[in-house]
Image (tube, helix red, strand yellow):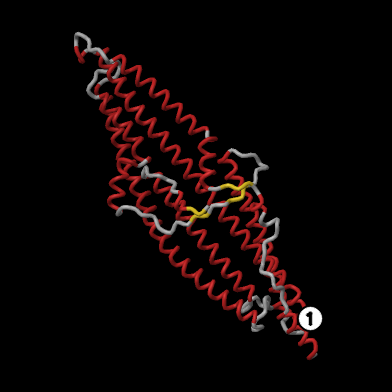
Protein backbone atom coordinates (compact mmCIF):
# COMPACT_ATOMS: atom_id res chain seq x y z
CA UNK A 1 0.00 0.00 0.00
CA UNK A 2 2.86 2.34 0.84
CA UNK A 3 4.43 1.54 -2.51
CA UNK A 4 1.20 2.43 -4.35
CA UNK A 5 0.95 5.67 -2.42
CA UNK A 6 4.52 6.45 -3.37
CA UNK A 7 3.68 5.82 -7.06
CA UNK A 8 0.76 8.20 -6.79
CA UNK A 9 2.93 10.92 -5.33
CA UNK A 10 5.40 10.46 -8.17
CA UNK A 11 2.60 10.71 -10.73
CA UNK A 12 1.26 13.83 -9.07
CA UNK A 13 4.61 15.61 -9.30
CA UNK A 14 5.87 14.16 -12.57
CA UNK A 15 4.73 16.61 -15.24
CA UNK A 16 5.54 17.70 -18.72
CA UNK A 17 7.97 20.62 -18.86
CA UNK A 18 6.25 22.29 -21.81
CA UNK A 19 3.51 24.87 -21.11
CA UNK A 20 -0.11 24.37 -22.11
CA UNK A 21 -0.68 24.91 -25.81
CA UNK A 22 -3.79 25.12 -27.93
CA UNK A 23 -4.05 22.56 -30.71
CA UNK A 24 -3.67 23.48 -34.36
CA UNK A 25 -7.39 23.06 -34.80
CA UNK A 26 -8.14 25.46 -31.96
CA UNK A 27 -5.83 28.09 -33.45
CA UNK A 28 -6.90 27.70 -37.06
CA UNK A 29 -7.52 31.43 -37.28
CA UNK A 30 -3.81 31.98 -36.65
CA UNK A 31 -2.99 30.23 -39.93
CA UNK A 32 -5.36 32.23 -42.12
CA UNK A 33 -5.07 35.46 -44.05
CA UNK A 34 -3.52 38.18 -41.85
CA UNK A 35 -6.10 40.91 -41.30
CA UNK A 36 -5.58 44.11 -39.34
CA UNK A 37 -8.42 46.32 -38.18
CA UNK A 38 -7.27 49.03 -40.63
CA UNK A 39 -7.42 46.60 -43.54
CA UNK A 40 -10.81 45.33 -42.43
CA UNK A 41 -12.31 48.83 -42.41
CA UNK A 42 -10.81 49.69 -45.81
CA UNK A 43 -12.17 46.45 -47.32
CA UNK A 44 -15.62 47.19 -45.91
CA UNK A 45 -15.60 50.71 -47.34
CA UNK A 46 -14.62 49.36 -50.73
CA UNK A 47 -17.15 46.54 -50.79
CA UNK A 48 -20.16 48.03 -49.03
CA UNK A 49 -23.08 48.76 -51.43
CA UNK A 50 -24.72 51.21 -49.01
CA UNK A 51 -21.66 53.46 -49.13
CA UNK A 52 -21.52 53.31 -52.93
CA UNK A 53 -25.19 54.24 -52.98
CA UNK A 54 -24.53 57.14 -50.59
CA UNK A 55 -21.83 58.44 -52.97
CA UNK A 56 -24.28 58.24 -55.89
CA UNK A 57 -26.85 60.11 -53.82
CA UNK A 58 -24.31 62.93 -53.38
CA UNK A 59 -23.76 63.03 -57.15
CA UNK A 60 -27.50 63.11 -57.79
CA UNK A 61 -28.08 65.80 -55.16
CA UNK A 62 -25.26 67.88 -56.64
CA UNK A 63 -26.79 67.68 -60.11
CA UNK A 64 -30.25 68.56 -58.76
CA UNK A 65 -28.86 71.50 -56.83
CA UNK A 66 -26.89 72.81 -59.84
CA UNK A 67 -29.94 72.55 -62.10
CA UNK A 68 -32.18 74.32 -59.62
CA UNK A 69 -29.56 77.02 -59.17
CA UNK A 70 -29.60 77.74 -62.90
CA UNK A 71 -33.34 78.33 -62.67
CA UNK A 72 -32.99 81.05 -60.01
CA UNK A 73 -30.22 83.09 -61.62
CA UNK A 74 -32.83 85.47 -62.98
CA UNK A 75 -35.67 87.25 -61.17
CA UNK A 76 -38.95 87.67 -63.05
CA UNK A 77 -40.55 91.08 -63.59
CA UNK A 78 -43.13 90.35 -60.94
CA UNK A 79 -40.43 89.64 -58.37
CA UNK A 80 -40.37 86.86 -55.85
CA UNK A 81 -44.12 87.05 -55.26
CA UNK A 82 -44.85 85.35 -58.59
CA UNK A 83 -46.19 81.88 -57.57
CA UNK A 84 -44.33 80.02 -60.31
CA UNK A 85 -41.04 81.60 -59.30
CA UNK A 86 -41.78 80.97 -55.63
CA UNK A 87 -41.97 77.27 -56.45
CA UNK A 88 -38.72 77.43 -58.42
CA UNK A 89 -36.90 79.15 -55.58
CA UNK A 90 -38.37 76.77 -53.02
CA UNK A 91 -37.12 73.87 -55.13
CA UNK A 92 -33.64 75.38 -55.08
CA UNK A 93 -33.72 75.79 -51.29
CA UNK A 94 -34.75 72.18 -50.82
CA UNK A 95 -32.09 71.02 -53.27
CA UNK A 96 -29.44 72.91 -51.30
CA UNK A 97 -30.62 71.27 -48.08
CA UNK A 98 -30.72 67.91 -49.86
CA UNK A 99 -27.13 68.26 -51.05
CA UNK A 100 -25.90 69.12 -47.57
CA UNK A 101 -27.81 66.16 -46.16
CA UNK A 102 -26.45 63.80 -48.83
CA UNK A 103 -22.85 64.78 -48.09
CA UNK A 104 -23.41 64.31 -44.38
CA UNK A 105 -25.10 60.97 -45.02
CA UNK A 106 -22.07 59.76 -46.97
CA UNK A 107 -19.73 60.68 -44.12
CA UNK A 108 -22.01 59.09 -41.55
CA UNK A 109 -22.28 55.94 -43.67
CA UNK A 110 -18.50 55.60 -43.62
CA UNK A 111 -18.54 56.00 -39.85
CA UNK A 112 -21.38 53.51 -39.52
CA UNK A 113 -19.49 50.91 -41.54
CA UNK A 114 -16.31 51.48 -39.51
CA UNK A 115 -18.38 51.08 -36.33
CA UNK A 116 -19.84 47.79 -37.55
CA UNK A 117 -16.39 46.49 -38.55
CA UNK A 118 -14.97 47.36 -35.13
CA UNK A 119 -17.84 45.51 -33.47
CA UNK A 120 -17.52 42.42 -35.68
CA UNK A 121 -13.71 42.36 -35.48
CA UNK A 122 -13.59 42.67 -31.69
CA UNK A 123 -16.38 40.10 -31.27
CA UNK A 124 -14.41 37.62 -33.38
CA UNK A 125 -11.21 38.42 -31.48
CA UNK A 126 -12.94 37.95 -28.11
CA UNK A 127 -14.51 34.68 -29.19
CA UNK A 128 -11.12 33.43 -30.40
CA UNK A 129 -9.48 34.29 -27.08
CA UNK A 130 -12.36 32.63 -25.22
CA UNK A 131 -11.97 29.54 -27.40
CA UNK A 132 -8.26 29.39 -26.60
CA UNK A 133 -8.99 29.63 -22.88
CA UNK A 134 -11.73 27.00 -23.08
CA UNK A 135 -9.40 24.62 -24.89
CA UNK A 136 -6.59 25.21 -22.41
CA UNK A 137 -9.01 24.47 -19.56
CA UNK A 138 -10.20 21.28 -21.23
CA UNK A 139 -6.64 20.21 -22.00
CA UNK A 140 -5.68 20.79 -18.37
CA UNK A 141 -8.51 18.56 -17.17
CA UNK A 142 -7.56 15.89 -19.69
CA UNK A 143 -4.03 15.87 -18.34
CA UNK A 144 -5.39 15.32 -14.83
CA UNK A 145 -7.66 12.44 -15.90
CA UNK A 146 -5.14 9.64 -15.38
CA UNK A 147 -4.08 11.08 -12.01
CA UNK A 148 -7.70 11.23 -10.79
CA UNK A 149 -8.43 7.73 -12.09
CA UNK A 150 -5.42 6.26 -10.30
CA UNK A 151 -6.13 8.23 -7.12
CA UNK A 152 -9.67 6.88 -7.08
CA UNK A 153 -8.55 3.29 -7.67
CA UNK A 154 -6.27 3.26 -4.61
CA UNK A 155 -8.57 5.24 -2.37
CA UNK A 156 -6.84 8.63 -2.32
CA UNK A 157 -10.07 10.20 -3.58
CA UNK A 158 -13.69 9.14 -3.09
CA UNK A 159 -15.99 7.77 -5.77
CA UNK A 160 -18.06 10.93 -5.41
CA UNK A 161 -15.04 13.14 -6.08
CA UNK A 162 -14.14 11.08 -9.13
CA UNK A 163 -17.68 11.34 -10.53
CA UNK A 164 -17.56 15.09 -10.00
CA UNK A 165 -14.27 15.21 -11.87
CA UNK A 166 -15.79 13.35 -14.83
CA UNK A 167 -18.72 15.77 -14.87
CA UNK A 168 -16.27 18.68 -14.80
CA UNK A 169 -14.36 17.15 -17.71
CA UNK A 170 -17.54 16.72 -19.76
CA UNK A 171 -18.58 20.29 -19.02
CA UNK A 172 -15.16 21.59 -20.05
CA UNK A 173 -15.44 19.74 -23.34
CA UNK A 174 -18.90 21.18 -23.99
CA UNK A 175 -17.68 24.66 -23.06
CA UNK A 176 -14.87 24.36 -25.59
CA UNK A 177 -17.23 23.17 -28.34
CA UNK A 178 -19.62 26.05 -27.55
CA UNK A 179 -16.73 28.54 -27.64
CA UNK A 180 -15.58 27.14 -30.96
CA UNK A 181 -19.11 27.47 -32.35
CA UNK A 182 -19.35 31.08 -31.13
CA UNK A 183 -16.04 31.89 -32.82
CA UNK A 184 -17.16 30.38 -36.13
CA UNK A 185 -20.37 32.41 -35.92
CA UNK A 186 -18.52 35.68 -35.27
CA UNK A 187 -16.12 34.98 -38.16
CA UNK A 188 -19.14 34.38 -40.40
CA UNK A 189 -20.48 37.80 -39.41
CA UNK A 190 -17.13 39.41 -40.19
CA UNK A 191 -17.09 37.66 -43.58
CA UNK A 192 -20.53 39.04 -44.34
CA UNK A 193 -19.53 42.62 -43.53
CA UNK A 194 -16.37 42.34 -45.63
CA UNK A 195 -18.17 40.51 -48.46
CA UNK A 196 -15.85 37.50 -48.28
CA UNK A 197 -16.49 33.89 -49.32
CA UNK A 198 -17.20 31.09 -46.87
CA UNK A 199 -13.71 29.68 -47.46
CA UNK A 200 -12.01 32.87 -46.30
CA UNK A 201 -10.28 32.44 -42.93
CA UNK A 202 -8.72 35.53 -41.33
CA UNK A 203 -5.85 35.77 -38.91
CA UNK A 204 -6.81 38.67 -36.65
CA UNK A 205 -3.56 40.49 -35.99
CA UNK A 206 -4.87 43.62 -34.25
CA UNK A 207 -5.84 44.00 -30.60
CA UNK A 208 -7.44 47.00 -28.89
CA UNK A 209 -5.14 48.77 -26.43
CA UNK A 210 -7.53 51.59 -25.56
CA UNK A 211 -7.97 52.11 -21.81
CA UNK A 212 -9.62 55.55 -21.74
CA UNK A 213 -11.67 57.72 -24.10
CA UNK A 214 -11.17 61.45 -23.75
CA UNK A 215 -14.45 63.34 -24.00
CA UNK A 216 -15.83 66.69 -22.97
CA UNK A 217 -17.98 66.87 -19.85
CA UNK A 218 -21.42 65.36 -20.21
CA UNK A 219 -23.31 68.65 -20.59
CA UNK A 220 -21.00 69.78 -23.40
CA UNK A 221 -21.31 66.45 -25.22
CA UNK A 222 -25.09 66.55 -24.93
CA UNK A 223 -25.26 70.13 -26.20
CA UNK A 224 -23.10 69.21 -29.18
CA UNK A 225 -25.15 66.13 -29.96
CA UNK A 226 -28.34 68.18 -30.20
CA UNK A 227 -27.17 69.46 -33.57
CA UNK A 228 -24.51 66.97 -34.67
CA UNK A 229 -25.95 63.60 -33.71
CA UNK A 230 -27.08 61.28 -36.48
CA UNK A 231 -30.21 60.75 -34.40
CA UNK A 232 -31.07 64.46 -34.67
CA UNK A 233 -29.68 66.07 -37.81
CA UNK A 234 -31.89 64.15 -40.28
CA UNK A 235 -35.00 65.37 -38.46
CA UNK A 236 -33.51 68.84 -38.37
CA UNK A 237 -33.00 68.73 -42.14
CA UNK A 238 -36.66 67.78 -42.63
CA UNK A 239 -37.66 70.62 -40.33
CA UNK A 240 -35.57 73.07 -42.37
CA UNK A 241 -37.35 71.93 -45.52
CA UNK A 242 -40.76 72.52 -43.94
CA UNK A 243 -39.64 75.96 -42.73
CA UNK A 244 -38.52 76.87 -46.24
CA UNK A 245 -42.06 76.21 -47.50
CA UNK A 246 -43.78 78.57 -45.09
CA UNK A 247 -43.04 81.81 -46.95
CA UNK A 248 -44.16 80.56 -50.32
CA UNK A 249 -47.51 79.90 -51.90
CA UNK A 250 -47.49 76.24 -52.95
CA UNK A 251 -50.22 75.21 -55.41
CA UNK A 252 -52.84 72.80 -54.05
CA UNK A 253 -51.45 73.06 -50.51
CA UNK A 254 -53.44 75.32 -48.15
CA UNK A 255 -51.44 77.38 -45.69
CA UNK A 256 -53.05 75.67 -42.70
CA UNK A 257 -51.81 72.30 -43.96
CA UNK A 258 -48.35 73.79 -44.41
CA UNK A 259 -48.47 74.87 -40.78
CA UNK A 260 -49.51 71.38 -39.65
CA UNK A 261 -46.61 69.85 -41.60
CA UNK A 262 -44.27 72.32 -39.90
CA UNK A 263 -45.66 71.53 -36.44
CA UNK A 264 -45.26 67.79 -37.02
CA UNK A 265 -41.68 68.27 -38.20
CA UNK A 266 -40.94 70.30 -35.07
CA UNK A 267 -42.40 67.55 -32.88
CA UNK A 268 -40.30 64.90 -34.64
CA UNK A 269 -37.22 67.07 -34.16
CA UNK A 270 -37.86 67.56 -30.45
CA UNK A 271 -38.52 63.84 -29.98
CA UNK A 272 -35.26 63.02 -31.77
CA UNK A 273 -33.35 65.33 -29.42
CA UNK A 274 -34.90 63.65 -26.38
CA UNK A 275 -34.06 60.18 -27.72
CA UNK A 276 -30.50 61.25 -28.51
CA UNK A 277 -30.04 62.66 -25.03
CA UNK A 278 -31.08 59.40 -23.36
CA UNK A 279 -28.93 57.19 -25.61
CA UNK A 280 -25.82 59.37 -25.54
CA UNK A 281 -25.98 59.95 -21.79
CA UNK A 282 -26.27 56.20 -21.25
CA UNK A 283 -23.25 55.54 -23.46
CA UNK A 284 -21.27 58.25 -21.67
CA UNK A 285 -21.76 56.52 -18.32
CA UNK A 286 -21.08 53.09 -19.86
CA UNK A 287 -17.70 54.34 -21.06
CA UNK A 288 -16.93 55.67 -17.57
CA UNK A 289 -17.79 52.24 -16.14
CA UNK A 290 -15.63 50.38 -18.66
CA UNK A 291 -12.65 52.63 -17.94
CA UNK A 292 -12.91 51.72 -14.26
CA UNK A 293 -13.30 48.01 -15.01
CA UNK A 294 -10.24 48.07 -17.27
CA UNK A 295 -8.18 49.67 -14.53
CA UNK A 296 -9.27 46.93 -12.13
CA UNK A 297 -8.63 44.20 -14.71
CA UNK A 298 -5.09 45.49 -15.28
CA UNK A 299 -4.42 45.12 -11.55
CA UNK A 300 -5.89 41.60 -11.57
CA UNK A 301 -3.65 40.64 -14.50
CA UNK A 302 -0.54 41.90 -12.70
CA UNK A 303 -1.50 39.87 -9.61
CA UNK A 304 -2.10 36.75 -11.71
CA UNK A 305 1.24 37.19 -13.49
CA UNK A 306 3.06 37.51 -10.16
CA UNK A 307 1.30 34.40 -8.87
CA UNK A 308 2.30 32.55 -12.03
CA UNK A 309 5.93 33.61 -11.63
CA UNK A 310 5.85 32.32 -8.05
CA UNK A 311 4.19 29.07 -9.15
CA UNK A 312 6.90 28.56 -11.79
CA UNK A 313 9.57 29.01 -9.13
CA UNK A 314 7.87 26.60 -6.74
CA UNK A 315 7.44 24.09 -9.57
CA UNK A 316 11.15 24.29 -10.46
CA UNK A 317 11.99 23.67 -6.79
CA UNK A 318 9.72 20.63 -6.71
CA UNK A 319 7.29 22.17 -4.25
CA UNK A 320 4.21 21.83 -6.43
CA UNK A 321 3.09 19.63 -9.31
CA UNK A 322 2.14 20.79 -12.75
CA UNK A 323 -1.22 19.00 -12.51
CA UNK A 324 -2.75 18.00 -9.19
CA UNK A 325 -5.81 15.93 -8.42
CA UNK A 326 -8.02 18.93 -7.68
CA UNK A 327 -6.47 21.38 -10.12
CA UNK A 328 -5.67 23.78 -7.29
CA UNK A 329 -2.31 24.97 -5.98
CA UNK A 330 -0.45 23.63 -9.01
CA UNK A 331 1.35 25.19 -11.96
CA UNK A 332 -1.41 24.62 -14.50
CA UNK A 333 -4.03 26.39 -12.38
CA UNK A 334 -1.75 29.44 -12.14
CA UNK A 335 -1.25 29.37 -15.92
CA UNK A 336 -4.99 29.22 -16.52
CA UNK A 337 -5.66 32.01 -14.03
CA UNK A 338 -3.17 34.30 -15.79
CA UNK A 339 -4.63 33.44 -19.19
CA UNK A 340 -8.16 34.12 -17.94
CA UNK A 341 -7.11 37.50 -16.54
CA UNK A 342 -5.54 38.44 -19.88
CA UNK A 343 -8.64 37.38 -21.80
CA UNK A 344 -10.85 39.40 -19.46
CA UNK A 345 -8.73 42.52 -20.00
CA UNK A 346 -8.86 42.14 -23.79
CA UNK A 347 -12.64 41.72 -23.63
CA UNK A 348 -13.05 44.92 -21.61
CA UNK A 349 -10.81 46.86 -23.99
CA UNK A 350 -12.87 45.50 -26.88
CA UNK A 351 -16.07 46.64 -25.18
CA UNK A 352 -14.57 50.10 -24.73
CA UNK A 353 -13.54 50.20 -28.40
CA UNK A 354 -17.12 49.31 -29.36
CA UNK A 355 -18.64 51.85 -26.97
CA UNK A 356 -16.30 54.58 -28.24
CA UNK A 357 -17.21 53.77 -31.85
CA UNK A 358 -20.92 53.93 -31.03
CA UNK A 359 -20.56 57.18 -29.09
CA UNK A 360 -18.44 58.79 -31.80
CA UNK A 361 -20.89 57.71 -34.50
CA UNK A 362 -23.87 59.15 -32.65
CA UNK A 363 -22.05 62.44 -31.99
CA UNK A 364 -20.55 62.75 -35.51
CA UNK A 365 -16.96 62.30 -34.39
CA UNK A 366 -14.27 60.11 -35.91
CA UNK A 367 -15.16 56.52 -35.09
CA UNK A 368 -11.75 54.93 -35.65
CA UNK A 369 -8.36 55.94 -34.28
CA UNK A 370 -5.43 53.71 -35.20
CA UNK A 371 -3.69 54.62 -31.94
CA UNK A 372 -6.37 52.66 -30.05
CA UNK A 373 -5.02 49.45 -31.58
CA UNK A 374 -1.92 47.27 -31.52
CA UNK A 375 -1.18 45.76 -34.92
Q: Residue at x 27, y 15 (%)?
A: 72
Q: Quadrant of the N terminus?
A: bottom right
Residue 364, percent across and down?
37, 42
Can you name the residue that lies furthest to the top here?
Answer: 77
154 vs 168, left or right, is right
Residue 370, percent across and down?
46, 49
Residue 116, percent across and down?
50, 44
Q: Residue at x 59, y 73 (%)?
A: 334
Residue 112, percent across and down?
45, 41
Above or below, comparing residue 41 to residue 262 in the picture: below
Q: How many callouts does the rendering have?
A: 1
Q: Which of the two residues, 159 or 101, is positioned nearer the viewer here? A: 101
Q: Residue at x 61, y 81 (%)?
A: 314
Residue under label 1: 153
216 vs 132, left or right, is left
Give the structural element (helix, strand or loop) at label 1. Answer: helix
- The part of the image, by quadrant, that contains residue 24 is bottom right
200 vs 347, left or right, is right
Above or below, comparing residue 155 to residue 88 in the picture: below
Above or below, comparing residue 31 to residue 231 in the picture: below
Q: Which of the two residues, 57 or 251, is positioned nearer the viewer here? A: 57
- The part of the image, by quadrant, that contains residue 159 is bottom right
- Estimate how packed mark 1 is, as few (under 14), some (14 to 19) or many (20 or more) residues with alpha carbons within 10 Å: few
Above or below, comparing residue 206 to residue 15 in the picture: above
315 vs 212, left or right, is right
Can you name the residue that lies furthest to the bottom here?
Answer: 2
Amino acid sequence: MKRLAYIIMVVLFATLCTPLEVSAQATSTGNGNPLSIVEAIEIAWDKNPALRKAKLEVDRAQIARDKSLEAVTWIPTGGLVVPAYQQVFNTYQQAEIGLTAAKKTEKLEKNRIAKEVIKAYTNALNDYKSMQLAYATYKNIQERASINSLANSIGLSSAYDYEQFKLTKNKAEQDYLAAESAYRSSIAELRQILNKSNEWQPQLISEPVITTYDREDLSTELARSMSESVLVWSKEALLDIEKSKQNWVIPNLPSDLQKIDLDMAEIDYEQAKQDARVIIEGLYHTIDLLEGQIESAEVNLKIAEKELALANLRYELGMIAKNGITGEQDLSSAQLKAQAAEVQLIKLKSQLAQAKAEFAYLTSKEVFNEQDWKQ
